[in-house]
Amino acid sequence: MSKRSKIILIIIAVLFIAALIWFGKKNQKSIVAYETETPFRTTIVKKTVATGIITPLEEIEIKPQITGIIDKILLVEGAKVTKGDLIATVRVVPNEQSLISAKGRVDNINIRLKNAKISYDRNKNLFDKGVISQAEYESVELTYNSALQDLKNAQNDYIIIKRGSAASGGAANTNIMAQMTGTVLEIPVKEGDQVIQANNFNAGTTIASIADMSKMIFEGKVDESEVGKLVKGTNIEVSIGAIEGAKFPAKLNFIAPKGTEEAGAVQFKIKADVSLDDKYFIRAGYSANADIVLEKKDSVLTVKEALLRFDKKTEEPYVEVQKEDGTFKKITLKLGTSDGVNVEVLEGVTIDDKIKIWNKASNDDDKKVN
């Protein structure tokens, strides 16, 4: 073999060895180093958040006692009122048919009264002369007095239909008074609007709504999965969207016995008395959230939920604990209460165990992380 051929073979051999070394390094799997964490003891608090609104504890709607037209409105929304204050006046617009009918009753009774008066005068003269008995006279007198009373009643009915109140009643029906001390929340009518009194077929027109703004409550809803854990009298915290950074203490006082279905989920209404702060003016209808503690456990053994994995077949939670030789073994856990970050460990690990922190570069990335 010539010298040149030997050199070519040597070069080919060197290149072949270099290629083997390069492919070997490329396919070599890098060693993954895992950090560890140990379980720790802490307080686990499981909360739920109920959304709702702030509303007055006492709120009433003022409705007219007669049908008519708003003549004057004397107050504005937001005004402070005392029970008995005049809010508005109503001008009566009588129904023509009812008015004519009432006038007809007055005329008919007047005719009957004139006849009774003639009979009464005649029988009184006869009684004074001793011609008729006292019983006959008293019967005629009763008929006359009844006719007088019927006329008075008919005249009052006519006046009420025409003016809205009898002469003896003044303007009681046409004056709309505040029925409680508080703040005028809303006046949904204006001067000139027609209003209807409440009856068997109509709730009546609301002239004003009044509430005591010093007593406010939170009204919200919770899901059926959490309502069973609520207890009346529980202290909660209410945060109001319009007042940033402030939280108001409240006490749960009502849990609805019946839920309503909303968007496929059953919701239960709750109410809580809110303790107000004089620094803030709380308006009715503010949106609010209530933080409610469902469960609290002090000084329990916990691990971070990020350390957990779940078996693909059994779906049981597990961690990998470091052994003395540096390798890891799989340990199935029994879990308790979770706050979304930390979870209570009932069985499986001790406070001295070193639990693998799952690295993103590991082959276990396809496993689910809680």
Image (cartoon, rainbow, N blue to C red):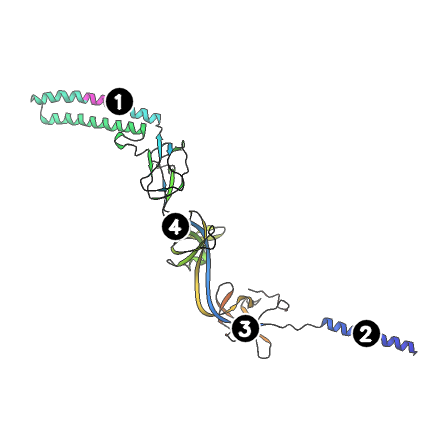
Density class for disc 1 (Cα within 10 Å; few <14, some 14-19, many ≥20) is some
Report whether residue 65 is seen.
Answer: no
N-term-proximal mark, 3 vs 2: 2
Q: Which residue corresponds to mark 3?
A: 331
N-term-proximal mark, 3 vs 4: 4
Going by the numbered disc 3, the residue's amino acid type is: Ile
Which numbered disc, 3 or 2, marks the residue closer to the eye?
Answer: 2
Q: Which residue corresponds to mark 2?
A: 16
Residue 216, label in figure: 4
Mark 1 in CB contact with mark 4 (< 8 angstroms): no
Residue at horizontal 75%, vertical 72%?
23
* Residue 214 rendering spot, x and y as whole percentages: 37, 49
N-term-proximal mark, 2 vs 4: 2
In the picture, measured across the screen, residue 106 lies left or right of residue 18, that is: left
> In the orientation shown, which residue stands out farthest toward the left?
130
Let me know if residue 174 is in the magenta part. no
Magenta range: 107-115
Going by the numbered disc 4, the residue's amino acid type is: Met
Is disc 4 placed on a helix, strand or loop? Answer: strand
Going by the numbered disc 2, the residue's amino acid type is: Phe
Residue at horizontal 76%, vertical 74%?
21
Q: Is residue 342 above or below residue 166?
A: below
Q: Quadrant of residue 158?
A: top left
Is disc 2 placed on a helix, strand or loop? Answer: helix
Q: Which residue corresponds to mark 1?
A: 107
